Image (spheres, rainbow, N blue to C red):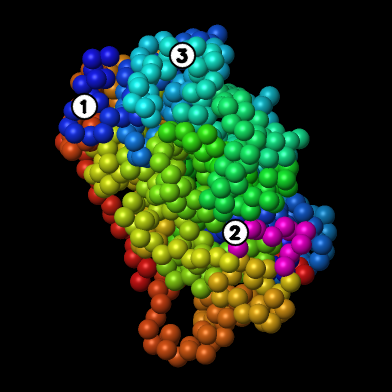
């Protein structure tokens, strides 16, 4: 992961999209305070989390919770659902008695649509389906009233028919509890659905190459990598998918992270490649209009050159990113 | 036998290369007998591509394995027929082949690329040695013939033969290994290839490359394809016909456009509504309530009835047959006439 800067408003949904090895999980762990960046900082309400004192850092770790991809691995198999959920409540002094813990756990199970709660309280993880386990993981993240949930491929391991209801539950949490999400996924369809009112950051080989409001990113992608991805994804519609224009890449091979190409790391595969520019100079993530950031020399030159024309015919950004009360920002930089 | 003969000659279609009738597969476990494949019948015609879609545990991989008699210990084909028509027109009964014959049948007549093909290659052998082993184990070919065929096929899947044949699997990327497996599956010029989740676990751009490779191979070579996938968009890309499986049964079969635009089974409809298109507006998506049934004791009547919004009392009692619902389109739903796909736009981009 290299030189990533992102910011997230309270209650905002930000999707981090990228393929395996793009650094999206690492970014998520850094945001959650589970990994320390080699350089750069993560700021929570303006304060660098790695400069915080113990109490502040504990509060930060409580404010930001992570839900992992694999609900089979992230829940302790020898504990019941009740124990799994009551432990953080007790540890963080959120409940005073066992009766109170039961009340709160029941409430949490209802929040994540595990109803009736009584039938789940004393079950062990192996007695639950993948979707139900993932709901328990989400309930566990909610025990400490977080402000931000980092959901790392949280819906990838469940079947399609169940995935949608899990997404709907997450969306309800966002709307009703005002929880912000850093939603990490390789699946642009899921990102589109979950973050329609938010923003998507596309990562490639450890760097953010495009960062835009979701409708604009999906329907008017700018970076050649984003364009290639969107053109490559098969659609669940035989006519649409067979007539979709495919983008020819110059190479099929994904460079190794140990030998990241110089200049723009996408240049060996990029159809817009310009010798002497793209293979030499690293493009910064720069604004191409009020809402969109793109890290591409060619696109930046063309867009800023013809900006007046583009302003005259707006290109599909319209829905405002969902922005909560301006309580601060989570930002991160490393280089 | 008679049913099969009828179907092979009816309505002027070329005789199927593979014909499956009333296939039943069971897993015998300590917890009980799992009815993994129940009364499955279908035809695969020469040159066509069928997608078998369904969620995990619906029996689609078991069906694929059963066709090659590759079922694991504890699983058995308890009933049904699998008929295969060789290039010379002779029809053989796959379930009657002896050990030697079935070994030749695999790869030479019908090859299968498994899910997790990335691990199917032997890590300590160079690709060339694996190609040679495969060819020699299943057919009598000379070293030069194998070399010539391997090189041609690797070029067809857009790999450089010189580089790849001398490489060990770990020196190749996931997408390259998958293409090697595809080339290997074609090595003995089979009439049928079964691909189990051919693009799962691959990156989007790599997935696209595999799809294009499969498409161009189908144009250049003469084989039929049965691919097993939970991925609806992949079926939309590559299939001529789609068969939906649920709880061990094929519950709908039809032309790919029929299935996607005019599904007539509530489960197929549910799957389609759970997977929206990427480009364009934000469509309404919905999930299918409940969870797939236990196949030790599948629900009586239609196995989908406990989750089905169209279900009525009859559905819990009476197992629906595959009704003719259109031209070469069948659906196992008593109330198929009521099932209709409508996509609701939630929000447009502007």
Residue A249 in sight: yes
| Magenta span dominant secondary structure | loop
The image shows residue A185 at horizontal and vertical percentages of 56, 52
Quadrant of the rendered structure where residue A259 is? Answer: bottom right
- Residue stretch in magenta: A251-261
Asked whether the beta carbons under mark 2 and mark 1 sit within 8 Å of each other, the answer is no
Residue drawn at point x = 72 percent, y = 45 percent: B166
Question: Is residue A136 located in the magenta-colored stretch of the structure?
Answer: no
* Res A252 label: 2
Binning the other alpha carbons within 10 Å of mark 2 as few (below 14), some (14 to 19) or many (20 upward) gives some
Residue A257 part of the magenta segment: yes
Q: Nearer the viewer, mark 2 or mark 1?
A: 1
Q: Residues within 10 Å of mark 1 (few under 14, many from 20)?
A: few
Same subunit under labels 2 and 1? no
Quadrant location of the N terminus of chain B in the rendered image: top left
* Cα–Cα gap, marks 1 and 3: 24 Å
Q: Is residue A177 visible?
A: no
Towards the viewer: B253 or B55: B253
Distance from the alpha carbon under mark 2 to that under mark 1: 45 Å
Q: Within the image, what quadrant is residue A72 found in?
A: top right
A83 displayed left or right of B84 = right
- Discs 1 and 3 carry the same chain letter: yes
Disc 3: which residue? B97
The x, y position of residue B68, in whole percent, is 48, 23
> Secondary structure beneath disc 1?
helix
Q: What chain does mark 2 sit on?
A: A
């Amino acid at each position: 992961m290299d030189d990533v800067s992102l910011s997230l408003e309270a209650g905002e949904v930000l999707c981090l999209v990228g393929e395996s090895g793009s650094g999206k999980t690492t970014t998520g762990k850094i945001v959650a305070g589970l990994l320390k960046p080699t350089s750069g900082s993560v700021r929570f309400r303006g304060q660098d989390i790695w400069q915080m004192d113990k109490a502040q850092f504990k509060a930060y770790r409580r404010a930001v919770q992570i839900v992992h991809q694999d609900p089979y691995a992230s829940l302790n198999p020898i504990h019941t659902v009740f124990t799994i959920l009551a432990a953080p409540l007790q540890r963080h002094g959120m409940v005073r008695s066992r009766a109170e813990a039961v009340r709160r756990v029941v409430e949490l199970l209802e929040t994540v649509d595990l109803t009736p709660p009584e039938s789940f309280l004393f079950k062990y993880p192996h007695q639950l389906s993948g979707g139900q386990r993932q709901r328990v993981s989400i309930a566990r993240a909610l025990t400490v009233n977080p402000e931000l949930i980092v959901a790392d491929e949280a819906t990838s391991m469940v079947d399609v028919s169940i995935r949608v209801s899990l997404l709907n539950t997450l969306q309800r949490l966002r709307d009703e509890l005002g929880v912000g999400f850093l939603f990490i996924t390789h699946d642009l369809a899921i990102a589109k659905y979950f973050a329609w009112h938010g923003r998507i950051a596309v990562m490639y080989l450890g760097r953010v190459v495009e960062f835009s409001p979701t409708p604009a990113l999906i329907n008017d992608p700018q970076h050649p990598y984003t364009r290639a991805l969107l053109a490559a994804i098969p659609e669940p519609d035989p006519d649409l998918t067979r007539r979709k224009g495919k983008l020819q890449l110059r190479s099929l091979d994904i460079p190794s992270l140990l030998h990241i190409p110089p200049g723009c790391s996408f240049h060996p595969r990029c159809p817009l490649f310009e010798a002497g520019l793209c293979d030499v100079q690293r493009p910064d993530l720069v604004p191409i209009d009020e809402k969109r950031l793109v890290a591409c020399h060619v696109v930046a030159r063309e867009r800023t050159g013809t900006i007046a024309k583009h302003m005259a015919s707006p290109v599909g950004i319209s829905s405002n990113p969902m922005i909560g009360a301006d309580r601060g920002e989570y930002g991160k930089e490393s280089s | 036998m008679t049913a099969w003969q009828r179907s092979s000659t009816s309505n002027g279609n070329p005789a199927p290369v593979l014909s499956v009738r009333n296939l039943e597969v069971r897993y015998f476990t300590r917890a009980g007998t799992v009815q993994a494949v129940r009364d499955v019948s279908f035809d695969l015609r020469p040159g066509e591509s069928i997608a078998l879609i369904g969620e995990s545990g619906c029996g689609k991989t078991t069906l694929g394995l059963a066709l090659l008699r590759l079922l694991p210990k504890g699983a058995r084909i308890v009933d049904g027929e699998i008929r295969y028509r060789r290039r010379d027109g002779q029809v053989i009964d796959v379930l009657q082949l002896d050990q030697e014959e079935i070994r030749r049948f695999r790869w030479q007549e019908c090859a299968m690329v498994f899910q997790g093909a990335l691990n199917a290659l032997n890590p300590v052998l160079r690709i060339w040695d694996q190609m040679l082993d495969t060819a020699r184990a299943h057919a009598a070919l000379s070293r030069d013939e194998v070399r010539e065929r391997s090189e041609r096929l690797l070029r067809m899947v857009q790999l450089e033969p010189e580089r790849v044949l001398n490489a060990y699997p770990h020196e190749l990327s996931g997408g390259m290994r998958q293409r090697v497996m595809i080339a290997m599956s074609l090595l003995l010029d089979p009439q049928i290839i079964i691909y189990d989740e051919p693009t799962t676990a691959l990156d989007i751009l790599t997935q696209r490359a595999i799809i294009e490779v499969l498409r161009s191979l189908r144009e250049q070579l003469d084989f039929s394809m049965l691919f097993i996938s939970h991925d609806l968009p992949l079926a939309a890309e590559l299939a001529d016909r789609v068969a939906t499986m649920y709880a061990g049964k094929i519950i709908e079969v039809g032309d790919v456009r029929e299935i996607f635009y005019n599904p007539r089974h509530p489960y197929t409809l549910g799957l389609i509504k759970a997977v929206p298109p990427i480009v364009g507006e934000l469509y309404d998506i919905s999930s299918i309530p409940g969870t797939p049934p236990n196949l030790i004791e599948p629900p009586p009547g239609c196995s989908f009835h406990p989750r089905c919004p169209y279900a009525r009392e009859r559905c819990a009692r009476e197992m629906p047959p595959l009704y003719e619902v259109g031209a070469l389109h069948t659906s196992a739903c008593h109330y198929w006439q009521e099932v209709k796909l409508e996509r609701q736009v939630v929000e447009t981009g502007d």
